[in-house]
Amino acid sequence: MRSAVVDVRGLRVDLDDRPVLHGVDLQVVEGEVVTLLGANGSGKSTLVRTVVGLVPSVAGEVRLFGTPLRSFHDWWRVGYVPQRTTAAGGVPATVREVVAAGRLARRKLFRPARKADRAAVDHAIELVGLSDQANRSVANLSGGQQQRVLIARAAASEPDLMVLDEPNAGVDKRSQEAFARALRTFVASGRTVLLVLHEMGPLAPLVDRGVVLDGGHVVHDGPLPTPSMTLTGPPDHHDDHREDYGAGLFG
């Protein structure tokens, strides 16, 4: 029996004293690809941000790899890509430099990069189809290419779990297809994925299970729902429209 990588029980989250998630249960097991679906404001982004420790809960529990979130420290095992983030960050940097930053969680403080680190960075860049752009400034890339850089940065630590919030939002078809290929390679190695999607697109064949949220409640958890069940509306963007700073992944 495969063990749970993400285990959420009775999760309640309030933002600005407003209930956003109401007693949510969610389990993602090893090697599974689970997508969160639902309309704008349904709580999808808040749920994944709570899972990675960026948003505190009011009640319930989150466990990662069997460890309560408050006690979890092996953040190199989790690759997180938030939505609405630029890879450029206002600082001149090449694709390789940005992706290499994702390797820091694997290295001891002030320790120089080793051969294994460089190989992991190269592999992550290749994974998203940007090897020919490795030495270009990320500021000169398209939005879709920048999103792929962020995915490569998350993959560089060779995580066991990838958590992605709207990875295909606002990116071109070529980047969507490149991401689908990268995800296929990632899950083929037995790793686990939890992602928020507004539209399935080329990722549909890779998804094992769909979880639909409506008003902060889980209303479907099982095979991918029919289009009528997948609530429509603009992409979720952050349910509380705040930046991704906080504890957990960055603490």
Image: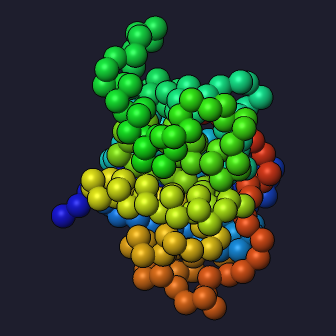
Instruction: Please state which of residues 247 and 84 is positioned toward the viewer in this rendering.
Output: 84
Q: Is residue 94 left or right of residue 182?
A: right
Front position in the image: 5 or 107: 107
Query: From the viewer's perspective, is 99 left or right of 63?
Result: right
Q: Is residue 109 left or right of residue 43?
A: left
Query: Quadrant location of residue 216?
Result: bottom right
At 47% from the left and 63% from the top, the residue drawn is 180
Q: Is residue 115 visible?
A: yes
Comparing 148 with 34, the one in front is 148
Residue visible at 23% across and 61% down in the picture: 2
Q: Residue at x 43, y 60 (%)?
A: 181
Image quarter hosting the C terminus: top right
Image coordinates for residue 155, horizontal then vertical, percent: 44, 42
For the point 51% across and 72% down, the residue is 202
In the image, farthest residue toward the top: 110
Asked whether the viewer can see residue 26, the reply is no
In the depicted view, which residue is nearer to us: 53 or 243?
243
Location of residue 92 by image quarter: top right
Q: Position of residue 28 (x, y in %)?
A: 39, 62
Q: Quadrant of residue 7?
A: bottom left
